Image (cartoon, helix red, strand yellow):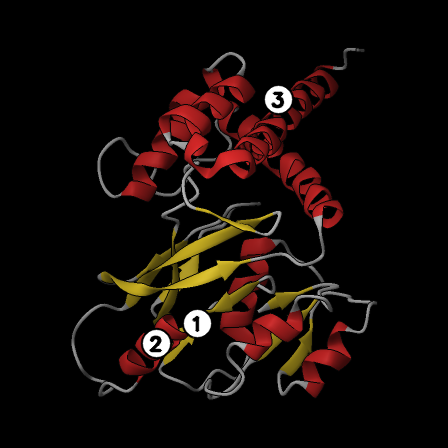
Amino acid sequence: MIVRDEVVNLPHSLGSVIAWADRVHVVDSGSTDGSIELARSLGAEVTSKEWLGYARQKNWALGHLPLSSDWILILDADEVVLPELRDELLAVASRPPDESGPQGFWINRYFVFLGRRIRHCGYYPSWNLRFFRRGRARYEEREVHEHMVVDGDAGRLRGHLEHHDRRGLEAYMAKHNRYSTLEAREIVRLRRGEATAAGARGLGGPIARRRWFKERIYPRLPARWLFRFLHMYVLRLGFLDGLAGWRFCLFISSYELLIDLKVVEIEQSAAGSGP
C-alpha cells in the first residue's frame, strides 16, 4: 500500500487485511497527519520513500521491500477487501507454490460516491489486476491510471474490493486536480509521439482496446467532457443510479474539462504563446 496523509482511511483499509495477511507493507511518501504512527500501531510495516510517481512508487516497492510471500496484493489506502474476496485470496495463496495456473488475478471493485455504491456509469464492473504471484508482474511506466502487466495468464475472482475515500469531496477534488494535470501531460506526450500506451491496440483484451481508443481516438474528439457525460449517463446507464449517478457523471465530466483546458495551457506554453 502506498500512502500519504491517509489517517482517515487507514483504519478501514488496514483493518480489512491485517488479521489474515502474512505481512502488510505501507510505503509512505511524506505523511504529516499521523499516518505513519497509525499504520504501525495497526500492525503494518512502514517504509518511507520520497514520491516517485504512481507506477514508479509501486514498482520500487515490488523491487525493494522484503517480500517473502508467494502471492502479493496491491491495495490502495482508500480501499477495503470485502469478506468473499478475502476467502478467495486465501484459497489461492494456499495452493502449492509450483502449481500451474493463473499468475495474476483481476479483482472487481465497487466505487462509493457520496455514501452510495455506483453500480453503472461505466464504473462497475471495474476490473483491476491486483493479486499476483511474486516476481511475475509490474506496473507499466505511466504518470497516472497505470495498469499492471503480468507475465503469464490472469484469472478473475468473484469477490470485491470497495473504493471509499472517507476524506470527503475536498480531498477527492484535490486528487482529480492532480490527476488532470498528469493526464493532460500524458495526452500531450502521446500527440507528440513521445509515449505509447502499453498494449494500445484495437484488438486484444479490454485494457488494450480501451488504451487504443484513448490514444488514437479520444484525444481527437471535440467537447470530450460532453462525450464523457453522455457515455456515462446514457450509454453506461448512469441514470439507473438515480440522483447519485447524475451527480457522479457531472463530477467526472468536469474532470475531463479540466484535462482539456490543461492540454491547451501546456501546448500554449510550449509554443511560447500567450492566453
**Residue at image coords 35%, 70%:** 132
The residue most toward the right is: 32
Mark 1 is surrounded, within 10 Å at the Cα level, by few (under 14), some (14 to 19) or many (20 or more) other residues, namely some
- Callout 3 amino acid: Asp
Q: Position of residue 229 (x, y in %)?
A: 50, 24
Corner quadrant of residue 231: top left
The residue lying toward the viewer, choosing from 85 and 27, is 85
- Which residue, given by chain and number where applicable, does mark 1 sit on? 73
Q: Do the residues labelled 1 and 2 touch (CB within 8 Å)?
A: yes
- Callout 2 amino acid: Leu
| C-alpha distance separating marks 2 and 3 | 40 Å
Taking 18 as reference, is 203 above or below it? above
The residue lying toward the viewer, choosing from 117 and 242, is 242
Q: Where is residue 133 in the image (x, y as percent from the top left)?
A: 33, 74
| Label 1: which secondary element | strand
Q: Which of marks 1 and 2 is nearer the N terminus?
A: 1
Mark 2 is surrounded, within 10 Å at the Cα level, by few (under 14), some (14 to 19) or many (20 or more) other residues, namely many
User: Number of callouts in the render?
Assistant: 3
- Which residue, given by chain and number where applicable, does mark 3 sit on? 260
- Which residue, given by chain and number where applicable, does mark 2 sit on? 89
Residue 135 at least partly seen: no
- Callout 1 amino acid: Leu
Q: Where is residue 31 in the image (x, y as percent from the top left)?
A: 78, 67
Corner quadrant of residue 97: bottom left
Residue 80 at least partly seen: yes
| C-alpha distance separating marks 1 and 3 | 34 Å
